[in-house]
Amino acid sequence: MKNRFLFRPILCALLGLLALTACRPELDYVVDSFRSSQATLSGGGETITVLFNSEAGTASIDLSASGNWTAEFVNGRAYWCTLSQTEGKRGLATLTFSVQANGEYDERSASVVFTSGDLKRTVVVVQKQRDAMLVSSGRFDIAAEGGTVTIEVSSNVDFTHAVAADAGDWIHSMSTKGLRQTGVVFRIDANPMLTRRSGTITFNGAGGSETVTVYQKGEIPTIVVSEEEVALSAEEGVFRVEIASNLDVTYEIPADCDWVRELVTKTVSTRTYMFAYDRNHAREARTCPIVFRNEEYEKAETVSVVQNPAEIVRDAQLILCPSTGDTFSILTHGAVAGFDQFRFDTDWPEAVSVTPEGDGNRFVVKVAPNPDAYARQTTCLVYRPGFEEPDRVAFLQFGQLPSFSYVTSQREVVAPVLLGLNGDALVIWGDGTYDVYEEGLTHQYQDAGPHTIRIEGDPLPFVLIGNPQNGMRYDLRNLNVL
């Protein structure tokens, strides 16, 4: 009887242990169940990576759970990637990832976190850009203590790899530089610095190049932005900010920066932020500070976005004109209504016509011949409704002095050398065309000529004329300006 009473507590203890073991929650991938003809699988443990090429495709893998589970895209759902099931119950569930074709030239990624109780598993979906060699990922995050990185390369062309010079002292290739390798291994040294660091490895082949960035954690939490200042044109457009951080990051745009906004549907990666910006109609530059921060560790980085002011005149701010006069065109932004908003401070240039072009107008200006011996100049003021200040276009017209000319019958000529030139000069070729002088300037004629070439400038201190050819005649009388 004693033995029977002794057996009962032992039996109860075993049953309790079995009950505890049976109730332990489980959440894991069934790696052998991966199915796809367009993607490959890498990684293991808590995080796996599904790598797609640039074409549209699907990939499936089974998830085994001992309880209810949910799935959530990190930083919001990616418009190009979908998941067949975002919640489930105990048992085996088939997860199917579908991606659209990537027509861009940048790799993109999306992360999905699966949660059951206090267990989490992550699937990182990476899609390569079009027309590129396929590497297992364009980014690797390494702990501060270092380790090894194996980059799987899928390529049907010969390729080599090289570590960037500024990272060669802590990223070391452990593979030979033989061609057609599929697994290239690199050793990453421990990071002795307090801050995060990054280095690049470039794979080159006949099919193009592929760059892999290795980010290594430092001894303290960090946020690294791709650039601290972004310069924008006055026209509307899109810009991106890359974030490298071992923290969860949020961003803030000031309320008075309503001309900048995030393009959520255009995000190409969970580590890339895409922003759109409006056209700047003001005459002054404007700035918008975007702050990326982590409240828990009190870390923040600011990206200063600077947009240039709007312009009225799109093309040249200085027009050089020969002494004989000519016609020129000036293209403006916006609809400048008429000649009353196109003003000269003298009467020798005159706006003679205006025609719409794109979202602006093209003005044609006629410059009369210069009757004076020396150069003259004037300024054209171009106004636009809503703008307090006009744009200015300077006109410089050369005079008869100082200048010289010569006659040639050559089909191809080289301009004489002008020494000590302090300003600009024109080379008038005699066939209806002319160019601003520069050393070594050449011109090709369509016929044998003869053609009279004239050089105008103010001043022309020294002229170096090469050996004259047969039939060349020089007229240097207008160089005598004393």
Image (cartoon, rainbow, N blue to C red):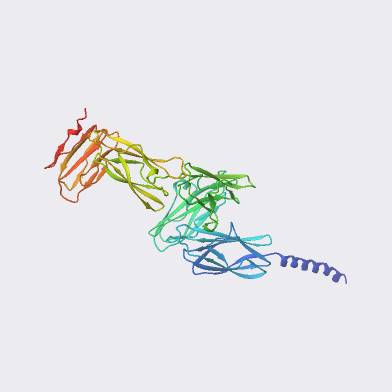
For the point 45% across and 58% down, the residue is: 105
Looking at this view, is 119 or 100 the one in front? 100
Relative to 396, is 341 on the left or the right? Answer: right
Whether residue 82 is situated above or below residue 242 in the rendered picture: below
Farthest left residue in view: 470
The percent position of residue 99, horizontal first and vertical second, equals: 52, 65
Whether residue 177 appears in this view of the structure is: no
For the point 46% across and 63% down, the residue is: 54
Whether residue 276 appears in this view of the structure is: yes
Relative to 208, is 251 on the left or the right? Answer: right
Farthest top residue in view: 482
Quadrant of the rendering where the N terminus is positioned: bottom right
Quadrant of the rendering where the C terminus is positioned: top left
Looking at this view, is 391 or 346 the one in front? 346
For the point 64% across and 60% down, the residue is: 120
The percent position of residue 185, horizontal first and vertical second, equals: 48, 56
The percent position of residue 109, horizontal first and vertical second, equals: 53, 59
